[in-house]
Image: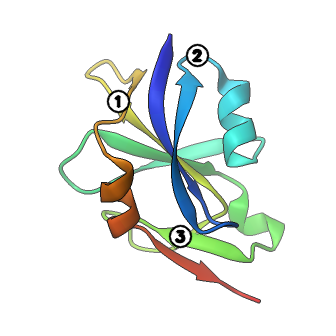
Amino acid sequence: MIIKGILIDSEERKVKPVDVESDDIDQMHRLIKCECFTCVRFGSERSEMVYVDDNGLLNDPKRFFSVPGYLGWLAGNGLILGVDRRGESVSTELTVEQVESAVRFFAID
């Protein structure tokens, strides 16, 4: 099943819509550019999660982003998906415009 997601591309400092096959972990790894991911909540009252590189800070990162509800910077790229009551990934209810206005990018050059 194809679900709607939002990619936070810290290298290009862009936020863009993506289609994700709901059970394709390899596709999620490719989008985030990682081998292992973890997730943090986007905002405090939403059922939206941001999937990020679990080892991002170990790879001498240069590009970061922040999201509401998480205190700190996240390394690399992020993928926003919704989560249902069973913990399954579903289409995000956020818009690209909502994410663009909430995400902050940071770089170390």
Q: Earlier in the sequence, mark 2 or mark 3?
A: 2
Position of residue 5 relative to residue 12, above or below, is above
Residue 23 - label: 2
Please rate how many residues cluster around mark 2, counting C-alpha atoms within 10 Å: few if below 14, some from 14 to 19, many from 20: few
Residue 60 - label: none
Q: Earlier in the sequence, mark 2 or mark 1?
A: 2
The reply to whether dot 2 and dot 1 touch (C-beta < 8 Å) is no
Structural distance between the alpha carbons of marks 2 and 3: 26 Å
**Kind of residue at badge 3:** Phe
Give the residue pinned by disc 3.
65
**Kind of residue at badge 1:** Val
* Front residue of 72 and 31: 31
Measuring from the top left, give residue 39's x and y in whole percent.
Answer: 50, 46
* Front residue of 24 and 11: 11
Q: Is any part of residue 42 visible from this angle?
A: yes
Position of residue 104 relative to residue 85, above or below, is below
What residue is drawn where x is 73% and y is 27%?
A: 26
Image mark count? 3
Q: Is any part of residue 36 visible from this angle?
A: no
Taking the view exactly as shown, the residue that stands out farthest to the right is: 59
Structural distance between the alpha carbons of marks 2 and 1: 13 Å
What residue is drawn where x is 58% and y is 81%?
A: 106
Q: Classify residue 32 as left or right of residue 81.
A: right
Residue 83 - label: 1
**Kind of residue at badge 2:** Asp
